[in-house]
Amino acid sequence: MKVIPLILMGCGGVGRQLLQHIVSCRSLHAKQGVHLRVVGVSDSKSLIIASDVKQKELDDNILAEVCRVKSDGSSLSKLTSLGESQVFSNSESRTKVLDIASILGKSTGLALVDCSASSETIGVLKEGVNLGCCVVLANKKPLTSTMEDYDKFVSYPRRIRHESTVGAGLPVISSINRIISSGDPIHRIVGSISGTLGYVMSEVEDGKPLSQVVKSAKSLGYTEPDPRDDLSGMDVARKALILARLLGKCIDLGSIKIESLYPEEMGPNKMSVEEFLNGGVVRLDNNIEERVKKASLNGNVLRYVCVIEGARCNVGIQELPKNSALGRLRGSDNVLEIYSRCYSQQPLVIQGAGAGNDTTAAGVLADILDIQDLFP
Amino acid sequence: MKVIPLILMGCGGVGRQLLQHIVSCRSLHAKQGVHLRVVGVSDSKSLIIASDVKQKELDDNILAEVCRVKSDGSSLSKLTSLGESQVFSNSESRTKVLDIASILGKSTGLALVDCSASSETIGVLKEGVNLGCCVVLANKKPLTSTMEDYDKFVSYPRRIRHESTVGAGLPVISSINRIISSGDPIHRIVGSISGTLGYVMSEVEDGKPLSQVVKSAKSLGYTEPDPRDDLSGMDVARKALILARLLGKCIDLGSIKIESLYPEEMGPNKMSVEEFLNGGVVRLDNNIEERVKKASLNGNVLRYVCVIEGARCNVGIQELPKNSALGRLRGSDNVLEIYSRCYSQQPLVIQGAGAGNDTTAAGVLADILDIQDLFP
């Protein structure tokens, strides 16, 4: 039996779902000859670890208890030591994780699995790399920090996986990596990689006013609590940066041209969410409506996409042929079109749900299984 | 530097292209810390191997010479020993390959890469598995033989890769494997996985007579020399069987319901290719035209697809919504729709060129790189 010891950082939506997947896949993975040994779980406040990380694990009862506490919206610090485990506060947890990495990283191997949305994990992850750990990320922050950080994470390319940083569990990163390693150079990627903005753009295409669409999207739970977090394009830009760097481009977030769907004077530091929704966004309706109509006259539609081509990495609204994979997109699915030597006339297209805890956690789990050959 | 020793079986179109890719990717792979050491190449008549398989390899000059001989349509037997290599006849080659597998399989590792289209490799591949070899297939035959053979090949699931058996280099098998290992059960796959039949069905949708479309497809080089090899559905059935078995179904080719686009009385043992093209296929025009019209009345189109769902594995013409990924398909691209828990309402869609030596060989090369962690 191949054993993969791991520490999970971040057990909010995605991380909690991952723990549930791990537990429910026990017999499937046993059949495949693999056992995922969870030796630690942390949130922003606490870390719970197995009492003897060389031998023991947080058993499925403890993992269930972790899930229960987190689904109540509580912190891991509410857990008192459960069975053969110990709970540490945030101030101690970094040191503890690195202790475990020193013990396991080069002997049995250790996967550091980051399902948080925080920049605070970057330091410990980098030290983990030095200590021989594998890194599996749903968190985009470590890969969208400086190029120096990025280079550190990919310095052992087989030891990092990050499928769920773009398009949730959609096989985007793994497919791009396959294409690259087969020597088929990718010269262009165009993608609608925000479910929220995909929904918004296909609704305004149908003639609905932007303001109404944004309000519906919010009430459907498609947006962040402040919809401007989606409309700013920053989330798309982070994903675009990850894709661009994967293609070998040495760029930073600052080099990406980002089109925000709202002007600066409607920014979060200028008006509240309510003001934006009730008075701000309606002022953007006409402009979008006109752009939609103009595109339509050319047989095109508007999509909020990332375009990575040559030295260019842009994020914003583009006019695209109605009759392309991107143009036909409806609703909140993600779509990526990848152009390479092998896919030159017609792109390789990958399409499907690109958000949701279940899908995102499934992508992380597939990544963990995918590094099993690196473990003794 | 990670070294992957390999023997290539079959160096016709795909195999020859693979050798060219391997040579042209030398510096890319060196950057990734990997070296592909080709210790042997065989075709149906001969085997050429490095003189000392433990240390040496067929160098890039020899590989270039192999490519030159094969592109002339000649056999490897035309090669006399080149540099530090030896040529063996077919009668000796099986024993020689297994000798090498015994020497390298469990020590340095050895990949047996099958780019032939022959059933004759099955025996040596199976023995190779016993000797610790990895198996990489573009050849569908080993996986569409008996369940006993299949079980042998997947007995070490990490040691087999076969992306290019379905949809050429499209990331179909790797994506399905990811979904399965993440515990997300796939309950339905529908795919147009024959470029030829994809082209045929989208052309008849436009109102062209089947007979004319088949003749155009043949003259465009889209079909086998005898177009009935495509129209019979057997190629699609083999790919469907591979997908069905990947989903855990214990079925044989005989259990698949296959719709042939021509009746038995027009089969290859009843009439010649010329008779079929000039007198036979025209008699099928009306029936197809009526079916296209009938589908159109329901807002649907006809596609030649595989459907794998529950215990069912069918291959044939289906009426599908015009507004689905499959319904929108034009030309010779392949499309797969995968439905699972995570992709339940909208499927995961993978679309792109699903044929061609370049793409197929790229898929094989990505598979070889993907098993690198199994080598010491």
Image: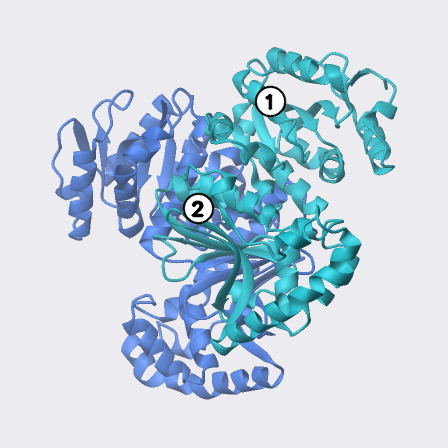
Chain colours: A blue, B cyan
Mark drawn on residue B123: 1
Provide the chain ID for the residue under circle 1: B
Task: Establish if B216 lies above or below A289.
Answer: above
Near-viewer residue (A305 or B193): B193
Residue depicted at x 62% and y 21%: B124
- Which residue is the site of mark 2? A142
Image check: A311 left or right of A261? Answer: right
Asked where in the image residue A300 lies, by quadrant, the reply is bottom right
Amino acid type, residue under disc 1 in the picture: Gly
Residue B1 in view: no
Asked where in the image residue B20 lies, by quadrant, the reply is top right
Provide the chain ID for the residue under circle 2: A
Image check: B275 left or right of A42? Answer: right
Amino acid type, residue under disc 2 in the picture: Pro
Near-viewer residue (B349 or A121): B349
Q: Distance between the residues labelled 1 and 2?
A: 48 Å
Residue A183 lies, in percent from the top left, at: 68, 42
Near-viewer residue (A122 or B187): B187
Near-viewer residue (A240 or B200): B200
Secondary structure beneath label 1? helix
Task: Establish if A91 lies above or below A327.
Answer: above
